[in-house]
Image: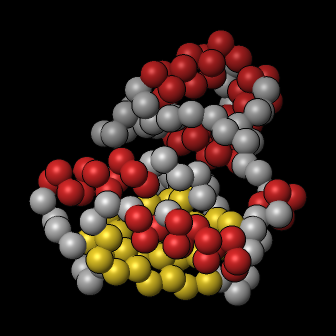
Amino acid sequence: MARNGFDAIDRNILREIQEDGRISMVELADKVGLSVSPCLRRLRKLEESGVIRKYVALLDPSHLHLGVNVFVTVSLTQHDEPSLRRFETAVQQHPEIVDCYAMVGNQDYMMRIVVQDPAAYQKFLSEVMMKLPGVANIKSSFTLHEVKNSTRLPVPETD
């Protein structure tokens, strides 16, 4: 085993399941060069250790008429722990906010919001974003088109 607990087979398992989370155990075992039982044991160990957080289905936003991605930076009025917690708790309540990161730099948070169209964003901005606790400033940038969108993490070859 490598220092981080992953050997080459574990890394290959992680790569394969990121590509296809519904891959059969027989096919996964074949692709990583194991029989089914040892492959299943390794997969379960990766799940139990938290390396694999969950399995999801990735939806095509165009089929849901969600054609607008907006990247938003938010600055807060206060930066004490209770204020940050209130803001972060409120953000969790809105599925339109698909990503939110606490930042270092000029803004406190960066988020990606997905909505149907610019009018839907304007409504979300006035009815939700401007009412989030502690918001001092919001800056929005609309995307033109998607160049790359991946949920796949790079799995290093070695430690």
Q: Is residue 43 visible?
A: yes
The residue sitting at the left extreme is 80
Applied colour scheme: secondary structure
Side of 127 relative to 139 (left or right): right
Residue at the image position 16 percent from the left and 65 percent from the top: 79
Say left or right for 157 vs 95. Answer: left
Percent from the top left, x then y, of residue 41? Answer: 56, 16
Specify the farthest residue to the top: 37
Q: Is residue 65 above or below residue 69?
A: above
Q: Residue at x 55, y 85 (%)?
A: 141
Q: Residue, x 65% and y 83% (percent of image)?
A: 143
Q: Is residue 42 left or right of residue 104?
A: right
- What is the quadrant of the N terminus in the image? top left
Whole-percent x, y for residue 107 in the image: 30, 78
Q: Residue furthest right?
A: 63
Q: Quadrant of residue 91?
A: bottom left
Q: Looking at the picture, tell me which residue is in the foreground, 12 or 138.
A: 138
Q: Residue at x 69, y 31 (%)?
A: 33
